[in-house]
Image (spheres, rainbow, N blue to C red):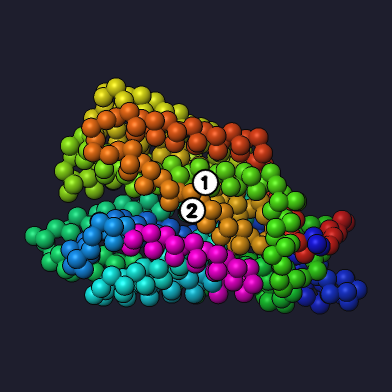
Amino acid sequence: MIGKGIDMTTASASESAAGGTGTVRSLIPARLDRLPWTRFHWSIVVGLGVAWILDGLEIQIVAANGYADTLHLSATQVGLVGTTYLVGQVVGSLYFGWLSDRLGRRRLFILTLAIYLIGSGVAGFAFSLWFLLIFRFIAGAGIGGEYAAINSAIDELIPSHYRGRVDIAINGTYWAGAALGAAASIPLFNPDVISQDWGWRIGFWIGPVLGLFIIYLRRHIPESPRWLITHGRAEQAERTIDEIEQRVESTGGRLERVDDSAAIELKPIEYVPFRTIVGVLFRKYPKRTLTAAAMMITQSFLYNAIFFTYALVLQNFYDIPRDHTPYFLFPFAAGNLIGPLVLGHLFDTIGRRKMIFATYGLSGLVLLVSAFFFHAGALTATTQTIFWCVAFFFASAGASSAYLTVSETFPLELRAQAISYFFSLAQIFGSIAPALYGALIGDGSQRGPLTIGYIIGAVIMILGGVIAIIFGTDAERKSLETVSEPLSLVGVRNG
């Protein structure tokens, strides 16, 4: 297995400097990382960040189950619709993650969004269960592919000094989508406002309408120059970085000179065999693999445990009517959305490991305290929601950093696939939580089982933070090529 990684000045100069051996010398990583923050980077944030908003919107609209009466579905069949969407996410993440590493980030973040638009849009015309399941699977596959392709593109285009806060903030926007879905569900599922048979269909069409606008924005986002140079497309990579720098300068950004000593030398590769990926994950970076798996699994388990059962808790233990539970989602979603926005920059300043440990640990401690108050019957629906808000203010930033950790600590050539593997692993373990916690809730006659469940969730989250502080990687404000050498890296020119 050859270590690799590339940046470039000009294609001809790179190839001649390599003596015709097929290697490329490049300054592209250094040129990208020294860029000041400008409108160009905001276009990336807006154009790519919508993926999480759409996912949050989808989950909330589907959770409202407005289609159940129209299609005459049982509770089991309603659950099957949600499961099918999650299975689609796993399949889409694995397949499109592999394609993203093979074909490029840009092609995939256009394709996956288009697939989502078709899947969700056509699902709004569903007339039977089988039709709905097919297109919910397709929508899930599109969103799953978005996670892999977009996290890769964001981290490869955003300067190293801003990478942590941007990635974490974007991942946290899932909750903006959840809040949007909750707000939309209030009139859409009120029969006094709109027909029940039409409300859920309109809900499925909200995401595609937003997506059409986002596809237009994404047309102006370039391919990752980092991906281009590692795949032997030196001339295209050089043109792309030149265009990016021109866009930055045209909006007032000042570019510092990049010293030639920052150049790296790469031997491009088009395909990474699966055995090589296994070697990277389990022989070269076993501690990183352990950290990534622990972070992804623990946050997924906790989120699914609480989010998918919060309405049951409010109904069974606090006697909140079913049609009033969406109102409690708004503060819950607000805490999840604000956390990454407020804490994100600290991951770039205080550091990754310390902040991961702090956010995972504090969220676990708050949930632990709330468990004892819950068991004592000392909480109301309002105070219970406040505890959730505080716990997930920290947990949301930590969960978002899990995706950042996976993306930046593995080599570029397998970055999207690594994200897809850990995302799928998290989904598998996370899918256990709703059924388990639903059983612990029961009919609401006993608080003991759910208290134990909350304690378990808290301890699991704290454990994820402990693993990160011990085995995690200090990746803050460092080039991706420094954090994890590309598989195509053959050398670094000094002076």
Q: Position of residue 24 (x, y in %)?
A: 80, 70
Residue 273 lies within the magenta run: no
The Cα atoms of the two marked residues, 1 and 2, are separated by 9 Å
The residue drawn where x is 57% and y is 43% is 294
The range drawn in magenta is: 80-107
Q: From the image, which quarter does the C terminus lie in?
A: bottom right
Q: Is residue 436 visible?
A: yes
Secondary structure character of the magenta stretch overall:
helix
Mark 1 is surrounded, within 10 Å at the Cα level, by few (under 14), some (14 to 19) or many (20 or more) other residues, namely many
Q: Which mark is residue 127?
A: none
Q: Nearer the viewer, residue 328 or 443?
A: 443
Q: Amino acid at mark 1?
A: Ile
How far from the left and from the top, in percent, is residue 259?
79, 58
Instruction: Based on the picture, tell me whether residue 104 belongs to the magenta stretch.
Output: yes
Q: Residue at x 33, y 28 (%)?
A: 448
- The amino acid pointed to by label 2 is Ile
